Amino acid sequence: MERPIKVLVAKVGLDGHDRGAKVVARFLRDAGFEVVYTGLHRTPQEVAMAAVQEDVDVVGISIHSGAHKELVPKVIKYIKEFGGNPEEMVILVGGIIPEDDFEELKKAGVDGIFIPGTPIQEIIDFIKKAVAEKRKAVAKK
Amino acid sequence: MNVEEIVEGILNKNRRALARAITYVENEYPEGKEILKRVYHRTGKAHVVGITGFPGVGKSTTVSKLTQEFRRRGKTVGIVAVDPGSPFTGGALLGDRLRLDGLDVNNPLWLDEGVFFRSMSSRGRAGGIAAKTGDVVRLMDAFGFDVIFVETVGAGQSEVDIIEVADTSIVILMPEMGDDIQINKAGILEIGDIYVVNKADLGGAEKTVKWLKSMIMMDQEALEILSKTTHADEHAVESGEIFERLKRTKDWIPPVLTTVAEKGEGIKELADAIEQHFEYLKKSGKLEERRIRRLSREVFDLIMDEIKNLLSKNDVINYREVIQKVVRGELDPHTAAEMVVEKLIRL
């Protein structure tokens, strides 16, 4: 039987708002995913450690403060440092991200970027497809 | 990671290996079973502490503060936190990790080498834990944690499965949670080795403490009186549960503590009580007794699973054909069952 998709929804840094993250978490739950929510003000290390310990398929980082170029690559770096393999995970970023930064984030290892107004179904479909691909790649190895 | 790497990893305290092993076990992959077989010899040292209680009483906060306290005492801590899965979609929001605080900003528990936290969905099971929680605890035990907390789903009145995995069960309540009749009902209010009235600063805590204490004392007296009659003796023999409780209440009287977990008040005393209970279990032989009882039930359940697997394989016994015979009236259900078991034994 296919195991349920496990998603970490993380708030990192100084952002004080998490309604968006909570709404997304709730929608993902309703889509049948198992969602681990971290709460506010986590450091990149804490998010990375949670991703490793919880052995999630997806790391979704919600960020509004503009610090995404700093913080997201750090999360990915620390996942590696803590023994995890970020390439086996789907890394997503959500929030207020200028289009100019997309390329840089993708180069850092981000698989998908979702800005405000993205239909939730788009995110769900993206996750299902991306996780299926990653799992297939891992199984082949 | 393959089975070999994961087993090696667990024995060498590699967190990623533990995390992956838990995933395999939780999702019933064949690799999970193999890993469990290979690390079993390393288990049995941890003190497994169950934390249960109604939603909102402060289970996660208490676990967080207890983890801090046990870290101060030099113990390593594994935590399994179970949250409910949706009966409609199977989805779950696992939100207990976010209460896990650090000793201070520079020493967050999230990053502490001596702490491992894992969230689990109950996946529709009703007893307050997930079907595989016991096996996940066993993996953490093999990894070498001194104390393993199992936080149940915010339980209702009958979610008592925690006693199937925990050595020490803690039941947390809040002030003004019902009158003395509520407290004398069965269910989670009879499984506690330790009772805690959290949020004791809300007022009304003394009354709840008094009720809990009277419940515990009345149980003891009532059982002692019952045990002197022959009728009760019969009962006690039939029902191991009553016997067990009778013995338990004689030499361990569950303490009733008050805490304000959010402020850390009463946490030291609770940690002391947890350690005292473990000592009591070890000295009295109850730990072994409880574990023997749990393991015998576990092996029995696994035997039943194996038999079900055999029955589903057509080349062993054509189960469907047997059923058809019963339907046609050529066999009665009792004879059919006896025949099937006979056949299985001869395999």
Image (spheres, coloured by chain):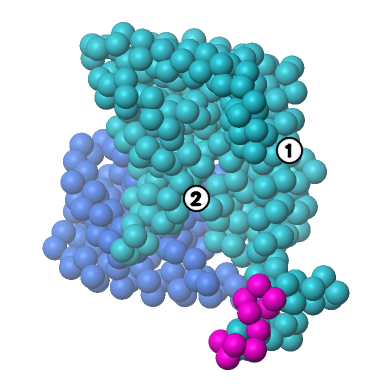
Chain colours: A blue, B cyan
Position of residue A34 in the picture relative to residue B161 (left or right): left
Which secondary structure lies at badge 1?
A: helix
Question: Disc 1: which chain?
Answer: B
Q: Position of residue B154 (x, y in %)?
A: 36, 39
| Residue A101 in view | no
| Residue B127 in view | yes
Question: Disc 2: which chain?
Answer: B
Amino acid type of the residue that numbered disc 1 sits on in the rendered structure: Ile
Q: Earlier in the sequence, mark 2 or mark 1?
A: 2
Q: Position of residue B325 (x, y in %)?
A: 63, 88
**Depth order, front residue of B102/A67:** B102
Residues in magenta, as a range:
B327-336
Residue at 19% over, 41% down:
A17
Extreme residue in the left direction: A117
Extreme residue in the front direction: B230
Quarter occupied by residue B20: bottom right
- Prevailing secondary structure class for the magenta stretch in the rendered image: helix
Number of other residues with Cα within 10 Å of mark 1, as a class: few under 14, some 14 to 19, many 20 or more: few
Position of residue B1 relative to residue B262, above or below, is: below
Which secondary structure lies at badge 2?
A: loop
Q: Which residue in the structure is indicated by mark 1?
A: B292
Q: Position of residue B50 (x, y in %)?
A: 52, 32
Position of residue B235 relative to residue A54, above or below, is: above
Number of other residues with Cα within 10 Å of mark 2, as a class: few under 14, some 14 to 19, many 20 or more: many
Q: Reply yes or no: does residue A76 show up in magenta.
A: no
Q: Which residue in the structure is indicated by mark 2?
A: B130
Check residue B1 in the rendering and tell me which mark sits there, or answer none: none
Position of residue B81 relative to residue B325, above or below, is: above
Q: Are marks 2 and 1 in contact (CB under 8 Å)?
A: no
The alpha-carbon separation of the residues under discs 2 and 1 comes to: 21 Å
**Depth order, front residue of B293/B82:** B293
Foreground tag (2 vs 1): 1
